[in-house]
Image (tube, rainbow, N blue to C red):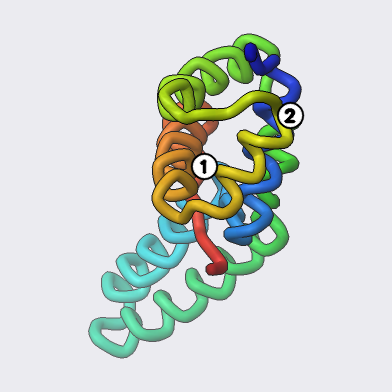
Amino acid sequence: MPINTKDMMELLCQVSELREMKAAVKHSGYGALLAGTGAFLGGLMGGPVGIAVGGAVGGVLGAGMSAGKFKPVPQIIMELSPQQQQQLYKKVRAIIRHLDWTDMAAITALVMTNGSIQDQVLGVLGSFLTNAVGAEIQYGK
């Protein structure tokens, strides 16, 4: 039985919620850059003590800049363009096509109860989001 893109995105949302996936989208790199820049500039101005102070100030600024920038993966999935959702659909479909299922409920149950399949699906999802939207993925479980 064919599975449509919308159903696949809902399945991915369920699996990512189960594993408590979050993604830092683009801004977390800037936070790290601020911390490093602060340490560098502090070192130029104040030597070893300046490195510590500059790193601390840069770290606080970086943390403030990236605070609240983490999004739940289901939200990111639903915000993907239709073309991106179709690309993701094809990648995940390649994993589940060989499984024995009859309808959406059956494939959902199979994926939700099989850790190995979940790992494969989440690996594709994480890789896709990293490459397509520059997200850094974190897992809660």
The Cα–Cα distance between marks 1 and 2, rounded to whole angstroms, is: 13 Å
Tell me which amino acid carries mark 1.
Ala
Say if 81 sits above or below 76 in the image.
above
Say if 111 sits above or below 7 in the image.
below
| Mark sitting on residue 135 | 1
Tell me which amino acid carries mark 2.
Glu
Secondary structure found at label 2: helix
Question: Which residue is under mark 2?
Answer: 79
Residue at point 66% right, 17% down?
A: 3
Residue 139 % position (x, y): 52, 61
Say if 122 sits above or below 41 in the image.
above
Q: Nearer the viewer, residue 32 or 82?
A: 82
Q: Nearer the viewer, residue 75 or 121?
A: 121
Residue 78 % position (x, y): 74, 31
Q: How many marks?
A: 2
**Label 1 CA crowd tier, 10 Å (few <14, some 14–19, many 20+):** many
Residue at point 46% right, 51% down?
A: 29
Residue at point 57% right, 74% down?
A: 60
